[in-house]
Amino acid sequence: METGNNTTGNFKKGFRKFLGWALVLLLLFGGGFFYYKYYFVLGEGVKSGYLNYAVKKGYLFKTYEGKLIQEGFGSARVGPGISSNEFGFSVENDSIFKILELNSGKFFDLHYKEYNGSLPWRGNTRYIVDQVINIK
């Protein structure tokens, strides 16, 4: 005679099980998306140019930022005219930043990794320089 109460109990158990699996799937999907957006290396390569500046800046997270001016002309601007190619990047490593800071204005070959997004403690750009290949 308690079949109605047992059905309600089974429904509650099934609903809790469904919510548990939905939460696990949501966490897995969210973690995968976060990894893909901020830690998956989309590309890596080498950029060459004259170091325009290397600075440490930020309000909450102090990050190392820099800019290379590449030789030649490009179409960074929309509209008529020509402009120089600029490569803005971030640096995580203190020792790499010190090399850049002491050699401003010189020609560099820098190895970088490109991510899908930037993190405030990693830098302001998606491009993270991880190695100085050559200084001229």
Image (tube, rainbow, N blue to C red):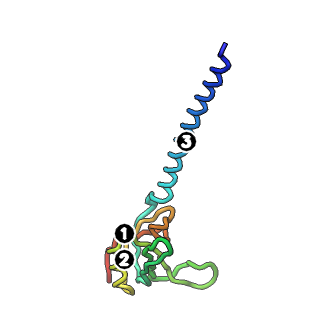
Residue extending furthest bottom?
105
Instruction: Choose between 114 and 2: the one closer to the eye.
Output: 2
Say which amino acid is labelled 1: Asp
Residue under label 1, please give it. Answer: 130
The image quarter in which residue 128 lies: bottom left
Q: Position of residue 119 (x, y in %)?
A: 49, 65
Can you identify the residue that label 2 sits on? 97
Which type of secondary structure does the marked residue at label 3 adopt? helix
Q: Position of residue 39 (x, y in %)?
A: 45, 58
The quarter of the picture where residue 89 lies is: bottom left
The residue wearing badge 3 is: 23
Instruction: Note whether 16 is above or below 104 in the view shown.
Output: above
Mark closer to the observer (2, 3): 3
Residue kind at label 3, given as amino acid type: Leu
Q: Quadrant of residue 7?
A: top right
Compute the Cα span from label 2 to label 3.
42 Å
Q: Secondary structure at mark 2?
A: helix
Say whether residue 89 is left or right of residue 78: left
For the residues marked 1 and 2, what is the alpha-carbon distance in whole angstroms? Answer: 10 Å
Pick the quarter of the image with the N terminus: top right
Q: Is residue 65 left or right of residue 75?
A: left
Q: Residue at x 59, y 79 (%)?
A: 77
Please provide percent x and percent y for residue 5.
65, 21
Pick whichever of labels 3 and 1 is earlier in the sequence: 3
Q: Disc 2 marks which amino acid?
A: Phe
Q: CA distance from mark 3 to mark 1?
A: 37 Å
For this view, does 4 lie left or right of residue 58? right
Horizontal relation, residue 107 to residue 16: left or right: left
Tell us which disc is closer to us: 1 or 2. Answer: 2
Is tag 2's residue or tag 3's residue first in the polypeptide sequence? 3
The furthest residue to the top? 1
